[in-house]
Amino acid sequence: MNKIRRLFGTDGIRGTANVAPMTAEIALRLGQAAGVVFTRGDHRHRVVIGKDTRLSGYLIEPALTAGFIGAGMDVVLVGPLPTPAIAMLTRSLRADLGVMISASHNPYQDNGIKLFDPDGYKLSDTTEMEIEALMARDLAAQMAAPDHLGRASRLEDASGRYIEAAKASFPRGLRLDGLKIVLDCAHGAAYRVAPTVLWELGAQVVPLGVAPNGFNINQGCGSTDPALLCARVREEGADLGIALDGDADRLVLADESGRLIDGDQILALIARRWRDAGQLVGGGIVATVMSNLGLERFLVGLGLALHRTQVGDRYVAERMRAGGMNVGGEQSGHLILSDFATTGDGLIAALQVLAVLVAAGGPASAVCNVFTPLPQRLESIRFSGPSPLEDREVQKVVAAAEAALAGNGRLLIRPSGTEPVLRIMAEAEDEALVQRVVGELAAVISTAAAISSVG
């Protein structure tokens, strides 16, 4: 087996639409190979395929469908729905595989493919490598005979099923009456279902980003560009702002003053609430190396542990399963509450925050700011060509930064798993030191990146 992964990153396959690896040809091969891997037993095999609102979904969806049908799998098409809805439907329909066509928070030019196993969990590295190895082989002999080809059908009530599942995660004795909520769906996959859920629970919903046209997903809106959300919360005098990303598996919140509330604060809020209610299991929660040290200190004060993983919500989910924990997530807003979902679900996480808000009866600014974070700065540097981390001058500056932070904080530099970007993060008690270290690193790495792209 070829163990060098060329297609799969930390969150499936992702790239520019109609350019390798996000072409119809590769999508067809992926459908064939994944179909071979997940055809187990004598039953009729089934795959659920969903997507977000990108124009290129019309390119990728039929190619994947053809690949799976050729491998002998029946295809259930559900159209635009959040990523967690595909995971849920995969389990509910007893499907052998789930597929989400989305590039999450990326602009419309990109697209991606995420795969879920029969239990609704993202595939392991090992399974992804097995599929990728098969894609490089001649699969003709493993394709279905003409009388064993799969069929394609559309599940008309897919949205309704997810809406009911999301509402079921909200405490039955509570309602959202009297709450005014600004909801930004990023012109993405949740543009219909998320407003419906909040409205049916009694909220007054001010919708943003609910008019997708194939090109405007995540454009000036959503969880990665929340300025519009914050401004609208202040303008409307709303109680809370909720911003989802393109496939609605992550979120950020804004309190009544328009101040952002990140994933670390939400994790702290839910962990404390669930611990007090006897709902938290496993003696702690899971987060990534990016989460603020202030979160860890807060949890220790509650007698809870923080287990860290590498960046990627599927690594969080794997650690949660291994440790028997039911709360985990990322600072960026991927939150996994395994009592209700197997993958990050921005809407369900928001509903848990709203449950605390309703029960507390106080403003979001008081309820949701749970701990004081250490000063932290994150910068992203885009590059082409070799990684700037290979540059000797960059390596010198990195070593100096690590020395400056030794004993006072920490430095993390990592490549993105979904795009050619380096993430630089530092945190320490001394905010001036954090700003200086990251500023110097960003400048040197940007220069190296520019030189390597020219040369």
Image: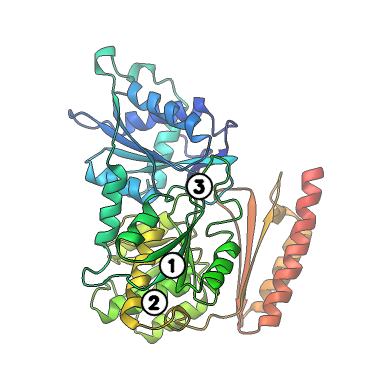
Residue type of the residue flagged with mark 3: Ala
Q: Is residue 206 above or below residue 17?
A: below
- Can you give x and y, in whole percent of width and height, for residue 187 in the image? 51, 49
Determine which quarter of the picture holds residue 399. bottom right
Counting residues from the start of the chain, the first of labels 2 and 3 encountered is 3
Q: Is the Cβ of the residue at disc 1 closer than 8 Å to that at disc 3?
A: no
Residue type of the residue flagged with mark 2: Leu
Which residue is drawn at the image coordinates 59% and 62% (left, top)? 228
Q: Is residue 331 above or below residue 137?
A: below
The residue that disc 3 covers is 211
Q: CA distance from mark 2 to mark 3?
A: 32 Å
- For residue 269, the mark is 2
The residue that disc 1 covers is 181
Determine which quarter of the picture holds residue 135. top left
Which residue is drawn at the image coordinates 52% and 70% (left, top)? 236
Which residue is most to the left?
42
- Can you give x and y, in whole percent of width and height, for residue 111 in the image? 53, 40
Determine which quarter of the picture holds residue 341. bottom left
- For label 3, the crowd category at 10 Å Cα-Cα, with few meaning under 14, some 14 to 19 and many 20 or more, is some
